[in-house]
Amino acid sequence: MENNSNFIKTIIEQDLASGKHTEIITRFPPEPNGFLHIGHARAIVTDFELAKTFGGYTNLRFDDTNPVKEDDIYVQSMIEDIKWLGYEPKNIFFASDYFDEMYERAIILIKKGLAYVDHSTAEEMAKDRGNINTPGKPSKYRNRTVEENLELFHQMKEGKFKEGECVLRAKIDMASPNMNMRDPAIYRISFAEHHRTGKNWCIYPMYDYAHPLEDAIEGITHSLCSLEFEDHRPLYDWFIKETEMPNIPRQIEFGRLNIENTIMSKRFLRELVETNKVIGWDDPRMPTLSGLRRRGFTPEAVKNFILSTGLSKVNSTAGYDMVEAAVRDDLAEKAKRVMAVIDPLKVTITNYEEDKVELIEVDYLQGHPEMGTRKIPFSRHLYIEKDDFVVTKPNNKYKRLSVGDEVRLFHAYFIKANDVVFDKDGEVIEVLATYDVNTRSGSGFNERKPNGTIHFVEATTANKATFNFFGPMIEGDDDMDLLDRFNDDSWEVKKGYVEHALLTTQPLDKFQFMRNGYFCTDKESKDDDLIFNETVPLKSSYK
Ligand code: ATP
Ligand code: MG
Ligand code: MG
């Protein structure tokens, strides 16, 4: 991996040099409560690439400690997305695999006098916790005896209390300047059904308690996470130490990646899905990995984008032009270069024989013989883009077709427009043109220069197609409600034609439609109803 030099790598090198570790083990620990987005890709790339650099490995661990929001659908999608990015976890684990051990370790804390069952209400607890400027107030349950706490915790587990009636709390320091250390909750009650453990448990560990234990159980050496966990690190270390875990992982934080005009929060993305603002988690406008994939992004483009943003200790915001540049660079060498006419205008070549179709063999991508060739049909009946024609040439800068002028059709012949057919509203509906048989592409003809080169498709063999274009999904200001910022005009549909060879295109095939942009075949595309999603325009649309 290029550009892999970063502060975490330096720390790992030191830990290896000092003999602190002999093998590097990292983990990517998503909560399965939504689909992965491009922000997660920063964590995934960091976790997997660093371990790989040092010959170590990475676990995928589902942090499934909150039964209400989690589901197996998300588990499966996350596994698929990580694989798509090109990474293979050494193990796939679940936090819920460790519920027994976490429970036992909580009992160690209680026995050491370091945890107690608190029957205060949530409001009382929040009030007692105080704020940065004032020390908190100890709960009236803080001095329960070890025996009492053991019994009450057991009863919590047995379902003797209602949701919210009590929690198990760590007994640390109610006056700590770090609010996270003011007796955080370790276990809470929930009777929701868990996607893996069903109704086995009605108490669930809190993230801050569960996470360090999960890392330690798996022997993770470097637990990499985003910056918002920095203030939680003392608590992370406290739990590792006081629960007497044999392995001691080290938490290291890195800056979160944000992208302008892009909201990357599973909660918000889920709201869009649930309110049908989008067609699903893989809507091509979504910043989810499945959305980007459906839009035509390659895993390499995503990775290159992540690497181009660097990795540092501060949060950063990348421009969308950086995302576009990464995908354009990658597709330039991968996408088949073919022709699509998105807003068609009929052209009849009046000096070309009726019923004859000739075939012109052309590389899918010049300089890439391994991508093969296809045959482009040419005949009396063609389509060009409406935009590529005006009746009267406006000025000499106009390099397209007009009456009396000649253009080259890519891969085919020079054609000259001689006349037009109007409909009753005065709209041009057909161009009557002639072709010059001597100008066939590849013939070396150079006696005249055409007035520009445009693309076309042969009308009788072309496939009807639907083209989806996408604008930013989110607009407006940060202080607006997120759902109100949804851009209802962010999906535009156009109809047209693609060249004959695309008849058998399969979902995720990548194309450059010459002079139009990069596109990808949609998963709903059928032979008799081809659908293409614009991945990225040829040039930056960002101003
Ligand atoms: P979200 O709020 O979108 O659900 P999350 O952080 O709650 O994100 P997790 O499932 O907990 O989602 O994320 C797994 C890992 O991915 C965490 O270690 C988290 O730090 C990291 N991560 C998530 N979003 C980003 C981001 N934008 N930049 C860098 N890392 C991220
Ligand atoms: Mg989270
Ligand atoms: Mg979240």
Image: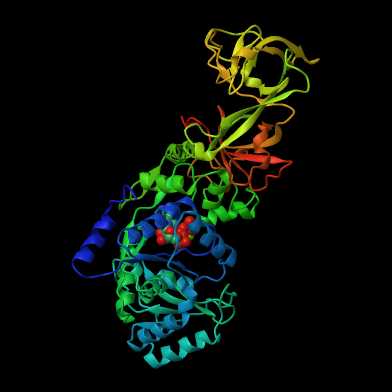
The single residue placed furthest to the left in the displayed view is 18
Whether residue 273 sits left or right of residue 134 in the image: it is: right
**In this view, 465 is above or below 269:** above
Which of the four quarters of the rendered structure image does ligand 1 lie in? bottom left
Please indicate, yes or no, whether residue 396 appears anywhere in the rendered image: yes
The vertical placement of 440 against 201, above or below, is above
Compare residues 264 and 377 and report the one nearer the observer: 377
Q: Nearer the viewer, residue 117 or 444?
A: 444
Specify the farthest residue to the bottom: 147
- Is residue 132 visible in the rendered structure shown here? no
Residue drawn at point x = 71 percent, y = 34 percent: 463
Q: Is residue 294 above or below residue 94?
A: above
Residue 130: give x, y in percent of width and height. Answer: 36, 67
Where does residue 306 sit, x and y in percent of width and height?
Answer: 40, 48
Most foreground residue, 310 or 402? 402
Q: Nearer the viewer, residue 99 or 306?
A: 306
Residue located at (53% from left, 47% from top) = 292
Residue 158, quarter of picture: bottom right
Query: Residue 148 location in percent, x, y?
Result: 42, 91
Q: Which residue is rendered at x = 46% and y = 86% of the image?
A: 153
Image x and y of residue 204, in percent: 49, 76
